[in-house]
Amino acid sequence: MVTGSIDVAAERAATPGCATVNHLNNAGAALPAAATLEAEIEYLRYEAVRGGYEAAVEVAERLAGVRSSAARLLHARPDEVALAGSDTQAWTKAVWGYFLGGGIGPGQRVVVDRITYDSHYLGLLQIGEVAGSTIDVVPSTADGTVDLDALATLLGAGHTALVALTHVGTHRGLVNPVEEAGRLCREVSVPYFLDACQSVGQLAVDLSSIGCDVITATGRKWLRGPRGTGLIVVRHDFAERLRPPGIGNSAAEWEDADHYRFRPGAGRFAEFEVPVAAHLGLGVAIDHALDLGIDAIAQRVGTLAEQLRADLGALPEVAVHDGGTRRSGIVTFTADGVSPSALAGAAAAAGINVSVSDAPWARLDMVAPNPTSKVRASPHYYNTVDELARLVEVVHSHLH
């Protein structure tokens, strides 16, 4: 079946997992294409017979190409991109780097949205213990998106060291108006970090149009890359304000016994000890997304997600909880009288992968009267309408 510019049958044939499982947990970790897997295995075999250091030197240009591909995807410069082990690792080094660079001090505040992910918020709490800073949470509008008027008011009050917002929450399908938020931040010259962990690979993410200073993302979700990979993008004229921790000679130059100097741009986030095979696999996955086109991916994912919302919402006793006027591929729902874990277990027994979002993932938003636990289904472009229908059948069969 061809949908738009994506040949779904061909994508399924090139994805080994599609033959064995109905995978609707792409917001957790998507199924990799065979080409991604082969790139990893091929390198590991070569490394085993050539030597780790030697093999890495020989693929240095290919690794640089991964950063270039990521830069194309995110409309950034290659020197604004660094590879990381995960979104959380990238975020931690970025936000601590901003603090160590003098960006967050006593009495200042960091502004976040209500759909902030746990590891991002925990990092800010930890910094607050050291810096004496506080966290202010921007209210959401009735549909769940960040309240831009409230954000403007907070920014106008001063003492804001950083705005850290979420493009797509892990527990809701809504898409935040991150471009509009960027305009507000630029008007008062407040740095802006964006969590794009759940958007890169399924939606267009443009460093310049969003107007943010730092973007962090993962490779294993919508990009269909390997686990243990992530990305950080740092605007070139902002990088000098960051002094990330955990540096080695890949991130800094040791000048003499008392001095060192950071590498320029995002190079200050570079790690020496990295999973080379996984990074090469990530490059293959990014190149595939670029070949398909992010607009075609977004259209296909959005169409499937809206179909699933409609079909689930038509069932008695089922409620869909995504909110927002613009939505992504994440679909969250509950059923009266049936726990989310029971529904996810029933789906697993039928060969369908979904997940459960619980309050500790997004504690600011997952509070009463909102559900504190939901089923999360997240179709990707290689999924089919029949696969969605099978999930709906499982849910329907468990309603009282």
Image (tube, rainbow, N blue to C red):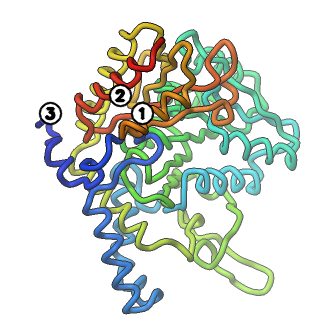
Q: Choose between 173 and 175: the one closer to the eye.
A: 173
Q: Nearer the viewer, residue 288 or 310?
A: 310
Asked which quadrant contains residue 37, the reply is bottom left
Q: Which residue occupies the foreground of this view, 251 or 300?
A: 300
- Apparent side of residue 388 relative to residue 370 in the rendered image (left or right): left
Residue located at (60% from left, 29% from top): 115
**Label at residue 389:** none
Q: Secondary structure at mark 1?
A: helix
In primary-sequence order, the first of circles 1 and 2 is 1
Quadrant that contains the N terminus: top left
Asked if the residue under mark 2 is in contact with the one under mark 1, i.e. CB atoms within 8 Å, the reply is yes
**Which residue bears the numbered disc 3?**
4
Mark 2 residue element: helix
Q: Amino acid at mark 2?
A: Leu
Q: Residue at x 21, y 46 (%)?
A: 292
- The mark nearer the N terminus, 3 or 1, is 3
Vertical relation: 400 (above or below) 94: above
Mark closest to the chain's N terminus, 2 or 3? 3
- Tag 1: amino acid: Ala
Which label was assigned to residue 391? 2
Assess disc 3: are there few (<14), some (14-19) or many (≥20) residues with their C-alpha within 10 Å of its C-alpha.
Answer: few
The residue that appears at 40% across and 34% down in the rendered structure is 378
Q: Which amino acid is tagged 3?
A: Gly
Sort mark 2 into few (<14), some (14-19) or many (20+) by Cα contacts within 10 Å.
many
* Residue to which mark 1 is pinned: 347
Note whether 386 is above or below 236 in the view shown. above
Q: Foreground: 168 or 70? A: 168
Q: Position of residue 350 (x, y in %)?
A: 37, 36
**Which mark's residue is nearer the viewer, 2 or 3?**
2
Q: Is residue 381 left or right of residue 95?
A: left
Give SS at disc 3.
loop
